């Protein structure tokens, strides 16, 4: 799977502390590895403190938004 982040999501990803950054990367990896997580519509996945909103197009995961409660 290829992952694409829209600019807003990429900006958030690179402006968070390392421990939060790792949680977001873990969420992206989980979506990429779970065939059930792939959907043609909007979907969201939540971690302990972070979330991401995404959609998939074939073998591409498009991350639309990421955020953290910390």
Image: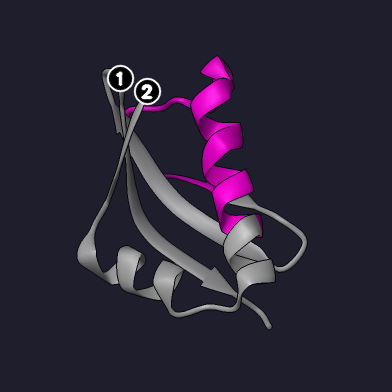
Quarter of the picture containing the N terminus is top left
Which residue is found at the position 53% from the left and 16% from the top? 35
Q: As drawn, which residue projects farthest toward the right?
A: 48
Q: Position of residue 9 (x, y in %)?
A: 34, 65
Q: Residues within 10 Å of mark 2 (few under 14, many from 20)?
A: few
Indicate whether residue 38 is drawn in magenta: yes
- Give residue 27's position: percent from left, percent from top: 60, 46
Which is nearer the eye, 55 or 21?
A: 21
Residue 44 against residue 3 in the figure, above or below: below
Part of the protein shown in magenta: 23-44
The image quadrant of residue 29 is top right
Q: How is the image coloured?
A: one colour
Residue on which disc 2 sits: 1
Vertical comparison of 1 with 19: above or below: above
- The reply to whether residue 41 is in sight is no
Q: Is residue 38 left or right of residue 9?
A: right
Tell me how far mark 1 sits from mark 2, CA to CA: 5 Å
Question: Callout 1: 10 Å neighbours few (<14), some, many (20+)?
Answer: few
Q: Residue at x 39, y 46 (%)?
A: 54
State the SS at label 1: loop
Q: Are marks 1 and 2 in contact (CB under 8 Å)?
A: yes
Residue linked to disc 1: 59
Which residue occupies 53% across, 78% down? 16
């Amino acid at each position: 799977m290829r992952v694409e982040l829209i600019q807003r999501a990429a900006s958030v990803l690179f402006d968070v502390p390392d421990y939060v950054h790792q949680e977001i990367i873990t969420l992206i990896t989980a979506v990429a590895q779970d065939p059930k997580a792939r959907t043609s519509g909007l979907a969201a996945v939540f971690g302990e403190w972070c979330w991401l909103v995404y959609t998939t197009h074939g073998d591409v995961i498009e991350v639309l938004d990421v955020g953290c409660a910390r």
